[in-house]
Amino acid sequence: MLEVIYFLLLPLLFFLLIIFVGWYLSEPGYHGPKSDHFSGRKFFLPQGHKINGYKEIIKLMWTMRPPFWIKNYESYAHNEQITRLPKETNRIYHINHSSFLIQMNGLNILIDPVWSEYCSPVPFAGPQRQRPPGIPFDFLPPIDLVLISHNHYDHLDIPTIKRLIEEYDPTIIVPLGVSRMKALRNHSKIQEIDWHESQRYGDLIITGTPAIHYGARGMFDRAKTLWCGFLIKGNKTVYYTGDTAYESQIFKSIGQQIKIDLALIPIGAYLPRWFMKLVHINPEEAVQIHKDLNSPQSMACHFGTFPLAGDGQGQAEGDLRKALVKHGIQASNFVIPDEGIPYPF
């Protein structure tokens, strides 16, 4: 009889544990007036777009077999201190995944910085880094501004953010609701931004842009905080799409209204398409965004660091090269960047 009770109780306890962990990881959401993408309780996508539900997530977890990645297949890292540049000199470094250091207008800007070994709620499990950051943290210049596109673990890394606050006390710009996270709410220099809303920092104007994605840290905060891309306008204009599915109206509108000098476009974590097409573009769509934006120079990101989906190591880069050839675009106009190497723009 006891064996039967244990047999019945164990699944229930396991289920309750999952619910508790999902609740614990969930963060407070945004509270504010309704808009064309906020219901008063949750954010939503433009008409015609949806995100996967828990049924699809469970199916993905049950069916996907992540391909094998070689650890430290590329291990180059910048090996000297980076210093502040004159106002008229612009450089960008790809650090890893979607993390960039941008030096422009005499300022040092980090986008979606992640230095942790795992992009996960715990420091010992989850998608593991497969190559080191292209710039060791200690070689960073003084950081003035940090831009965070959304609260997923591969874009908002709490240990990294805490260390940046301790060492540089930067201004941090996040989408609506993200500043309410328990680890961020006490930082006095954090600002929230909505789609199409702008914040000024020094000579820069930072504008939030729409993206087809979602935000969540746990099971009960899905779409309760906003996600976005960023336009960074200074002596040049840099556009970072953020994580996004493809929506021609968004990118063509930006390309028609704004002269882009450099576009940062994701190419990885796109398989299987039945699931990922709702939240991530594939390399073919990345090339289409490059064209929609009329971008003279684009740079790939969101690849090669964390095994997040069904595309294998190097597959995103290979598929991007094929798409560029198909569309007659020179590889020099859509660069697959080496990590830790300065690129002038």
Image (tube, rainbow, N blue to C red):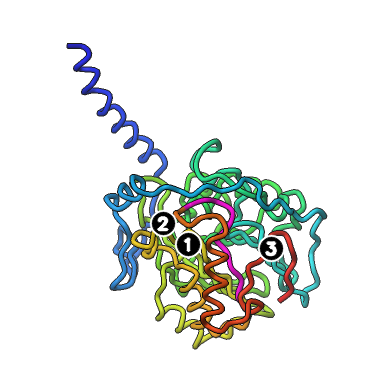
Name the residue at 51% across, 76% down: 287
Residue under numbered circle 1 = 175
Residue under numbered circle 3 = 338
Local secondary structure at mark 1: strand
Report the number of discs.
3
Q: Amino acid at mark 2?
A: Gly
The tag earlier along the polypeptide, 3 or 1, is 1
Name the residue at 80% across, 53% down: 79
What is the CA distance from the residue labelled 3 to the residue labelled 1? 29 Å
Q: Mark 1, residues whose alpha carbon is within 10 Å: few (<14), some, or many (≥20)?
A: many
In this rendering, position of residue 243 left or right of residue 221: right
Name the residue at 55% across, 55% down: 313
Q: Of all residues shown, which one is farthest toward the left?
A: 1
Principal SS element in the magenta part? Answer: loop
**Is residue 206 shown to the viewer in this render?**
no
Let me know if residue 304 is in the magenta part. Answer: yes
Q: Position of residue 188 (x, y in %)?
A: 58, 53
Q: Which residues are magenta?
A: 297-308
Q: Amino acid at mark 1?
A: Pro
